Amino acid sequence: MTNKHTILAALKQSALDQHAMPAMDVVANNDDLVGQFNASLKTVAGTLHSEGGLAALQQAVDELIQQNMQVISLLDGIKGNRQVPETAHDLADIDYAVIPGDLGVAENGAIWVNQPSHRVTPFICENLILALAKDNIVANMHQAVKQVALQPGELGLFIAGPSKTADIEQALVVGAHGACSLNVYLY
């Protein structure tokens, strides 16, 4: 028996018995979910646009296109100036990506995105725009995880603000390794 097998056998013998997860009774604060979501989104460097709905989003996209920005839209009804490419490598010069959000979480500003096309889209674009239905905001993550599901091979993730990193001196850098900004449009 090799050292690897000896170590794995010892770990297997010392494994703890399986225990059920404890039941948690979390009381949700459902008062003004949009207001809570907005406050939380601000703390993670995101911006909420709660007025105007999809028309305001299309107007913003049109203004970006007039500024010669490359905009890709994965949201039905919103038209960018770039089509969804066949390979993710063709997304390298995307300035803005418009992606539908499925569920917002008021307590932390996170948005569940079930990404059926190129997995790299929310991360490779310079700026990210998420569209979210006002009725799809829940109070907390306890409620959110009960509502999200993935099919085999799908990518789903919670996005909370643009890319951020901080060093040991606590200097926050936004956009260090992903989108430099996050705008959320409610409709």
Image (tube, helix red, strand yellow):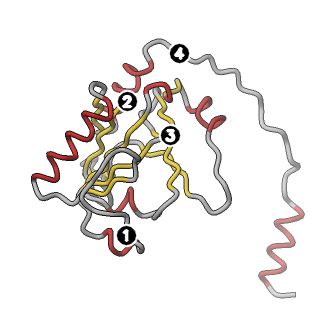
Give residue 132's quadrant in the image.
top left
Gap in angstroms between the C-alphas marked 2 and 4: 22 Å
Classify mark 2: helix, strand or loop: loop
Could you say which is closer to the camera, residue 88 or residue 176? 88
Residue of label 1 = 85
What residue is drawn where x is 58% and y is 18%? 28
The amino acid at mark 4 is Asn
Q: Considering only order in the chain, which callout, 4 or 2, is on the residue closer to the N terminus?
A: 4
Gap in angstroms between the C-alphas marked 1 and 2: 27 Å
Gap in angstroms between the C-alphas marked 4 and 3: 20 Å
Gap in angstroms between the C-alphas marked 4 and 1: 42 Å
Q: Considering only order in the chain, which callout, 1 or 4, is on the residue closer to the N terminus?
A: 4
Q: Label for residue 29? A: 4
4 vs 3, front mark:
3
Classify mark 3: helix, strand or loop: loop
What residue is drawn where x is 88% and y is 49%? 17
Gap in angstroms between the C-alphas marked 2 and 3: 12 Å
Q: Quadrant of the C terminus?
A: top left
Gap in angstroms between the C-alphas marked 1 and 3: 23 Å
Q: Position of residue 155 (x, y in %)?
A: 55, 57
The amino acid at mark 2 is Tyr
- Mark 4 is surrounded, within 10 Å at the Cα level, by few (under 14), some (14 to 19) or many (20 or more) other residues, namely few
1 vs 3, front mark:
1
What residue is drawn where x is 84% and y is 57%? 15
